[in-house]
Image (tube, grey):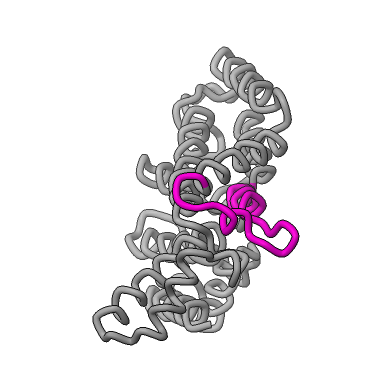
Amino acid sequence: PIYWILCQFVGWMLLAIAGDCGGVWDALFLAVSAWHNAGLLTHNLPFGNDNTSAFSLIIVMILILGGNTCFPLALRMLVRLQHAVLGYGQDKRATHVLDLLLEHPRTCYTHLFPYHATRWLALVTPLLVVVQFLALCLADYWAEPANGVGISRIMVGLTMWDRVWATYFQSISTRTAGFSVLNLALLSPTSGLVFIVCMWISVSPVVVVMRSTKRRNGIIAEELLDGNCAEEHDRGQLSSQLATFMSENSAALLVLLFLILLGEEYSR
């Protein structure tokens, strides 16, 4: 509860200090909405050539990640930090409880994962953001548009840094939160496909990890195994869950469809 309340409160204060998200209560609504990935607004997101808009967008992006996709990462980090602090204080009872949380996390909470699963999630989460960023750059940043002015219609009137910020923000927001700083009515078909795929993926990395370490007959899978065996077992479960989620050839078909749409956009 402290993590949830404190992060939203700090986000609210920072957005209110920035002063470009409407009033104080508009900033509170935005902070809570971003944290819970609700995608609701009472005031347009700040976006332009001023420095405060970039600061506000960074705060919103951190809230989006901290409240959803990166929550398991932050949770394990906080448990590890508390374990290190209490270890110096020789509080053996509290240290024993934290040892249990770190060694058998799914016994206690659904979103607290073993180290190897958390490590996998820490790798996949930024990787998905980078992939979407590059895909949107190809589609809307460098692509020749149908209107023939050398810049995508959705990026018209924006400076280079504005386009970078907009693309980066959309890469983080699209999968879960749904906020936008661009006019989505002007999306190219290629970018539309990228958005659809990202919304389809959504929070699947977290779900995949959750299912791969789930209870079986009241016992956590990794609790039956030790050390490397547990990691190998969960790795097999991760592969199985990913294969089920992506089906057999859907990933390859989506990549081919993206390349076809991108080729048509460049050839116009």
Give yes or no for residue 167 being in the magenta stretch: no
The spot of residue 157 in percent (x, y) is: 46, 42
Q: Splitting the image into 4 quarters, where does residue 236 fall?
A: top right
Q: Is residue 11 above or below residue 67?
A: below
| Most distant residue in the left direction | 88
Q: Is residue 73 visible?
A: yes
The spot of residue 211 in percent (x, y) is: 67, 52
Give yes or no for residue 216 being in the magenta stretch: yes
Query: Between 125 and 8, which is closer to the camera in this rendering?
Result: 125
* 58 on left or right of 36: left
Query: Between 155 and 210, which is closer to the camera in this rendering?
Result: 210
Quadrant position of the C terminus in the picture: top right
Identified at 38% across, 73% down, the residue is: 18
Q: Is residue 112 above or below residue 202?
A: below
The spot of residue 198 in percent (x, y) is: 62, 42
User: Could you tell me how many numbered marks the image carries?
Assistant: 0
Query: Between 61 and 69, which is closer to the camera in this rendering?
Result: 69
Q: Which residues are magenta?
A: 202-229
* 63 on left or right of 209: left
Q: Splitting the image into 4 quarters, where does residue 177 fall?
A: bottom right
The spot of residue 158 in percent (x, y) is: 43, 43
Query: Between 210 and 67, which is closer to the camera in this rendering?
Result: 210
Q: Is residue 193 above or below residue 264?
A: below
Identified at 50% across, 51% down, the residue is: 117
Identified at 53% across, 21% down, the residue is: 148
Identified at 45% across, 27% down, the residue is: 142
Q: Is residue 167 visible?
A: no
